[in-house]
Image: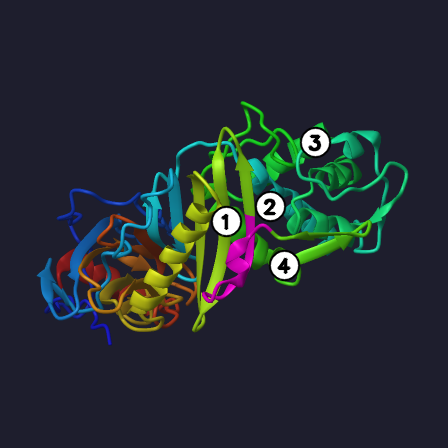
Amino acid sequence: MPMPLCKKRSAQASPKPSSRSTTNNTSLPKPWPPQEAIVLNSTQLRPNLPAMKRVILSLVLAATVSTSVLAQTATAPAAAETSATAPVSQYTKAIYVYHPDTGTILINDNGDMLAGPASLTKLMTLYLTFEALKEGRITLQTPVNVSEKAWRTQGSKMFIEVGKPVSVEMLIKGIAIVSGNDACVAIAEQLGGTEEGFAEMMNKKAKDLGMTHTTFRNSNGMPDPQQRTTAHDVAMLLTAIFRDFPEYKKYLAEESFVWNNITQQNRNGLLHADVGIDAGKTGHTEESGYHLASTAVQNGERLVVVVMGTSGFSEREGTSLQAYRTLFASHATKEIFRAGDAIVTDVPVWHGNVSKVNLTVPESVKAYLNRSNPGEAKATVTYDKPLVAPIAADKPVGQITVTLGNGQQITSALVVQQPVAEAGFAGRFFQTLGSKFGF
């Protein structure tokens, strides 16, 4: 169990405001916004509160090492090296592997390299379709008209026909299973009026989801020099689909589809593999190469793997399989800091019914780490000193940032272990006198 950071106790009965901030970290995360000193007016017969000082503590987290930092000590489970043990990226231009439950990035090889998305574009078309279903703007049975533009769309097809309405559910299958470009245009015109209008919706949603390197120009991924994405952004999009619409993820795992008396197979060969794939989407253009975005679950652990720019089907599938097999076999979720446990102890409180309080995290801080060699990492704790009562149990009063061995940072708010009520008038008065005159 993680041990708390134990601050040396002062001989003073009441906390005395520190005269300076403390830091020994030359590379710090963005500081937590400082609280303003609270000034009480004369009619309340209460003096001004002291100016607050930033306190920044650094510690090393390791499996068996306890390190003293700024008169604070701590031990915690290890958190560190997260790359796969095998060179899984030798056949691909970009690969990004992510553990969504903890936010751990396991492999990031050219994850932010811009490339044409090809049919991975259709993941956004599906996201917006699922969103429209959830909001009640359409149903699975809503008939969708097929325009001549949709019918004439080139590339992979569902084979819809002009003037013959198709249900939303059939179009979803046509997009998710057989990658129908024609089905994408039909959905785009239904939801956006025109494909251009739908592309605007796609770009807005990409921004909302944090896909900062992505630009869409059409609904199906047909080549366009201005249409670009990254493996990182695609991983975020696929994660958003199964997070926001778990009931519709199933369409991305169906192996075949029959429409207009034509049976077509899903091009995602990983659906037949033994690694627990439950959703995925393929993509290919001559310019971009072969792409594959997928997600799998084993023993309750989910991974998202995005491979972009391979030279063929077998390379994109083989690279993905190697990542899944290597990481599922070697890694597990480790708890670094447990919710409710004291991480920083004896933090001074001003004008509270207690003089000191412990800080903890509202939710456990976890990472997906190598079982046999979790390695070492660093944690940085930042908070304002003193804290000022009243303090609610869920009010952020600082932050803790864990830097893993690969440089990735996991950040959590710090909260008080127990809520702190404001002291009565006498308590506040004598606390102020004590800080001014040292008694």
Q: Name the residue that disc number 3 marks.
A: 154
Q: CA distance from mark 1 to mark 2?
A: 9 Å
- For the N terminus, give its image quadrant: bottom left
Q: Earlier in the sequence, mark 4 or mark 3?
A: 3
Across and down, in percent, residue 360 comes to 32, 67
Residue contact between numbered discs 1 and 2, judged by CB atoms under 8 Å: yes
- Amino acid carrying label 3: it is Gln
The residues colored magenta run 267-281
Q: Earlier in the sequence, mark 2 or mark 4?
A: 2
Can residue 392 be seen here? The reply is: yes
Is 320 part of what is drawn in magenta?
no
Q: Place residue 429 in its image quadrant.
A: bottom left
Q: CA distance from mark 4 to mark 1?
A: 16 Å
Q: In the image, is residue 141 above or below residue 228? A: below
Q: Place residue 402 in its image quadrant.
A: bottom left
Q: Secondary structure at mark 3?
A: loop
Q: Name the residue that disc number 1 marks.
A: 293
Q: In the image, is residue 192 above or below residue 374? A: above
Q: Earlier in the sequence, mark 3 or mark 2?
A: 2
Q: Place residue 330 in its image quadrant.
A: bottom left
Q: Name the residue that disc number 4 marks.
A: 255
Identify the residue at the far bottom of this view.
Answer: 1
Across and down, in percent, residue 434 comes to 19, 63
Of 191 and 12, nearer the camera is 191
Q: Name the residue that disc number 2 marks.
A: 123
- Amino acid carrying label 1: it is Ala
